[in-house]
Image: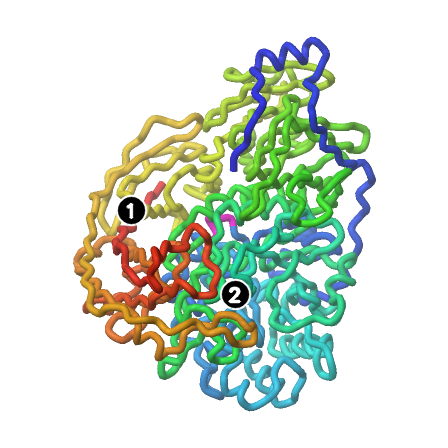
């Protein structure tokens, strides 16, 4: 994310303001937000039991969710328990909490639990009850997506083979519904005592998925019947949802629709780049952002469209990444994902829900049955047998990816400012793009209520260059006033996206606007309030206050000028120091910190040492058992900064032994510490063991009439390499990531004949956490690579397309490395 600017010195700006003339802009982007904000209507929604034993109450109106009567705008993230080892659940749930997730969601995949008729398995990695209990321990609410059809790139959408083979599904067929009733009864037993009404974390149940099927015993009648079965099974929760896209059909008032959007269509059949996606365009008249991959066809507008005025705009599947399908292997960048946030929030979304937030791996069925969606079992898509990486912010082995760092600042904003945003309504600009492929017209929106609001801007569209908006200012008409910002016009470059506040109340101080994004508010009681903002890369920071506050503004490294009823602070140098302090007589102080863009991505907020604190670190951090847990992949050096400072010297340990933690030079208001663990140089030897043979031509077929994955017999053409990693190297580490850089069609990792993981070549880095393999490392590993044919009719990003140099195919392991993952535990 970057900006090109017309730069003006702070002195020149102030001189211009004092001379009574504001800088003139070549481009003034206008929006009228002066109309009164109507009170939210009552939601047409019959909720379940919504009061917890301690009196906490959940609710909803037609605009937003409520918690104890106050507006609530949470962040939800999908994490499939049955695709992750149970030994990792607690740490991974705490990582999600640290990433700013409030609600964890998960499908219950029927065929993971009842692969054989009548024999349910809720043990180990399938222990839903323990997963929910650990979510509560981590401070997360839970939405359970009970299906029975989930999709989730699972074989038959999660419905067991023996059901699919014997009867009609996804309808009120009596035989099918009798089995669903048994499934729901089992789920209800797992959740008993864990529901909101019992003091537990389960606040919602999602029924079915991507359901737009109509006809006798189908459509709204089927969803209504599923809800009755859920209630009969004891699943009495505040919220019942269904997915709302692609013409979904449901009984109005019984459930509320949830929406989503993805930056590409890996389920598509094109072997070329797609046109610009709706996901990057603000929506003012609809909640559906394009094709989301429903596997049944709608024949009319769905209930979600006709219900949009009586249900809140909630999200469940905004892609935090994308899966790799055999025929289409889309790779997304962190900015491709994070730039969707201003668009969705600026379009009125009042629950930001992601799919997937945590990657995983498919379990193997009885007798080695493949559990993934596949054309071999009649599926529309071919997906990898084991890997369900999804390019998620948290990888299958809990590794933090760049996209998490780009998303977290928005989550921090929603945590501390979401209650203010939720009641605000969407305001449409005077001019906006007519179609998603308009790459010239500026993309922006305002949400406001009364005289307060937020400005949302997006100038990023995946794989397409957006026109720079040159010498730009925004003019926002609010009741009784018009705010023009910034005072110095800027060129908003291709790739820019941000949220800026309008008349933001900071502990009684009115911030008219800021050219920086609000991140967090830290209330320290009598000591005052610290408001943290994040600078937009390359954009000079302007903070505008009421003119009467000018004598009370203290900004030692910036300039303060008064003009036109505003006290403008300019020349702010982003960093961890106090940019501005507001000292009012008889009032507690307000301190404003404006972090750099990089620091914003390193910021997290957590309860540590009995106090809510700001934490800055380039390492992955989360809190468990009252201690700060830090993970570092590849580097044994740790550094973190904390505010407010800790009263004593914290202690550090790793793998049961003490570690040296030393105080570092403070960074602005932050207290800083450093530690360095003994570096580990992990070795892996790679030996070719079988030469690749000529691969069979890729077949066009399946219901998509596109490239289908090779048959099992075709893998006889794969080349193989043996990988030897001495287990003793890994002792004392939190994990070790095996990183395989290969080029080919499909890579598979084995221990003996047991497949551990697999990967479609795409240019995206393949990693596998070795410690979860445990005893399987007692023998050498094998990686096999099926050759990629030069004529394969699949989509690969142009950056990853290999140079075949006249060869008919390629299969090579270019390198194998082992990345040590160090962990440091810091106790206040």
Specify the quadrant that holds the C terminus.
top left
Secondary structure under badge 1? loop
For this rendering, which residue is in front, 805 or 273? 805
- Majority secondary structure in the magenta region: helix
Answer whether residue 273 is magenta in the image.
Answer: no
**Which residue matches tag 1?**
634
Q: Is residue 316 left or right of residue 118?
A: right
Residue 259 in picture, x, y percent from top left: 64, 59
Question: Foreground residue, 527 or 642?
Answer: 642
Quarter occupied by residue 16: top right
Instruction: Decide: is 814 above or below 113.
Output: above
Between residue 262 and residue 192, name the one nearer to us: 262
What's the magenta region? 96-100
Query: What percent of the width, then of the height, locates residue 197?
Result: 61, 65
Q: Which mark is residue 799?
A: none
Mark nearer the N terminus (2 vs 1): 2
Q: Is residue 684 above or below residue 24?
A: below
Residue drawn at (52%, 68%) of the image: 152
Which residue does the numbered mark 2 point to in the structure image? 106
Which residue: 46% across, 62% down?
A: 324
Residue occupying the point 35% across, 76% down: 714
């Amino acid at each position: 994310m970057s900006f090109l600017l017309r730069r003006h010195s702070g002195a020149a700006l102030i001189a211009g303001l004092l001379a009574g003339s504001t800088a003139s802009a070549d481009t003034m982007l206008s929006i009228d937000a002066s109309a009164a904000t109507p009170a939210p209507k009552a939601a047409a929604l019959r909720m379940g039991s919504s009061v917890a034993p301690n009196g906490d109450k959940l609710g909803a109106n037609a605009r937003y969710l409520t918690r104890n009567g106050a507006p609530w705008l949470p962040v939800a993230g999908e994490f499939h328990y049955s695709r992750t080892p149970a030994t990792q659940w607690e740490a991974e749930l705490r990582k999600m909490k640290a990433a700013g997730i409030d609600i964890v969601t998960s499908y219950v995949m029927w065929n993971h639990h009842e692969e054989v008729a009548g024999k349910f398995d809720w043990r180990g990695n399938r222990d839903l009850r323990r997963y929910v209990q650990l979510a509560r321990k981590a401070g997360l609410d839970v939405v359970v997506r009970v299906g029975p059809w989930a999709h989730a790139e699972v074989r038959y959408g999660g419905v067991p083979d023996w059901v699919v083979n014997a009867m009609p599904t996804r309808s009120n067929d009596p035989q099918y519904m009798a089995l669903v009733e048994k499934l729901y009864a089992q789920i209800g037993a797992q959740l008993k005592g864990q529901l909101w009404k019992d003091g537990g974390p389960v606040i919602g149940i999602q029924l079915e998925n991507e359901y737009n099927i109509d006809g006798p015993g189908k459509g709204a009648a089927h969803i209504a019947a599923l809800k009755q079965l859920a209630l009969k099974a004891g699943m009495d929760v505040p919220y019942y949802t269904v997915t709302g896209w692609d013409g979904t059909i449901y009984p109005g008032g019984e459930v509320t629709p949830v929406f989503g959007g993805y930056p590409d269509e890996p389920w598509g059949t094109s072997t070329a780049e797609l046109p610009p996606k709706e996901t990057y365009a603000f929506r003012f008249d609809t909640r559906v952002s394009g094709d989301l991959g429903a596997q049944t066809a709608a024949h009319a507008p769905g209930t979600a469209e006709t219900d949009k005025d009586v249900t809140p705009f909630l999200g469940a599947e905004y892609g935090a990444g994308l899966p790799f399908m055999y025929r289409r292997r889309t790779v997304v960048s962190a900015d491709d994902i994070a730039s969707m946030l201003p668009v969705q929030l600026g379009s009125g979304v009042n629950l930001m829900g992601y799919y997937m937030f945590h990657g995983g791996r498919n379990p193997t069925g009885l007798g080695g049955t493949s559990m993934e969606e596949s054309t071999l079992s009649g599926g529309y898509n071919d997906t990898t047998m084991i890997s369900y990486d999804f390019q998620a912010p948290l990888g299958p082995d809990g590794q933090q990816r760049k996209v998490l760092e780009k998303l977290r600042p928005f989550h921090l904003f929603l945590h501390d400012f979401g209650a203010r945003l939720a009641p605000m309504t969407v305001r449409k600009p005077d001019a906006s793009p007519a179609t998603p492929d308009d790459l010239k017209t500026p993309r922006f929106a305002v949400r406001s209520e009364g005289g307060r609001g937020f400005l949302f801007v997006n100038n990023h569209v995946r794989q397409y260059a957006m026109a720079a908006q040159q010498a730009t200012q925004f003019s926002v008409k609010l009741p009784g006033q018009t705010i023009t910002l910034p005072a110095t016009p800027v060129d908003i470059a291709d790739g820019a996206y941000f949220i800026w506040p309008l008349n933001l109340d900071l502990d009684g101080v009115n911030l008219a606007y800021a050219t920086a994004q609000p991140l967090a508010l830290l209330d320290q009681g009598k000591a005052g309030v610290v408001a943290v903002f994040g600078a937009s890369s390359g954009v000079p920071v302007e903070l505008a206050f009421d003119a009467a506050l000018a004598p009370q503004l203290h900004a030692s490294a910036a300039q303060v000028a008064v003009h036109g009823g505003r006290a403008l602070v300019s020349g702010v140098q982003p960093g961890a120091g106090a940019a501005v302090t507001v000292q009012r007589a008889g009032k507690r102080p307000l301190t404003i910190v404006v972090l750099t863009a990089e620091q914003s991505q390193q910021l997290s907020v957590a309860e540590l040492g009995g106090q809510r604190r700001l934490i800055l670190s380039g390492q992955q951090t989360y809190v468990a058992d009252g201690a700060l847990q830090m993970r570092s992949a590849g580097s044994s050096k740790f550094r973190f900064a904390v505010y407010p400072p800790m009263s004593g010297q914290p202690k550090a340990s790793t793998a049961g032994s003490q570690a040296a933690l030393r105080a570092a030079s403070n960074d602005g208001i932050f207290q800083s510490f450093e530690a360095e663990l003994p570096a580990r140089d992990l070795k892996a030897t790679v030996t070719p063991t079988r030469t690749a043979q000529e691969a069979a031509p890729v077949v066009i077929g399946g219901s998509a009439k596109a490239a289908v994955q090779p048959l099992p017999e075709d893998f006889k053409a794969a080349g193989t390499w043996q990988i030897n990693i001495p287990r003793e190297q890994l002792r004392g580490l939190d994990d070790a990531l095996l990183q395989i850089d290969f080029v080919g069609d499909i890579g598979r990792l084995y221990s003996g004949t047991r497949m551990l993981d697999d990967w479609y070549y795409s240019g995206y880095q393949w990693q596998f956490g070795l410690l979860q393999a445990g005893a399987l490392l007692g023998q050498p590993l094998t990686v096999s690579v099926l050759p990629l044919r030069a004529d394969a009719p699949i989509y690969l990003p142009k950056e990853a397309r290999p140079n075949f140099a006249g060869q008919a195919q390629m299969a090579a392991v270019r390198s194998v490395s082992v990345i040590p993952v160090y962990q440091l535990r810091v106790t206040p």
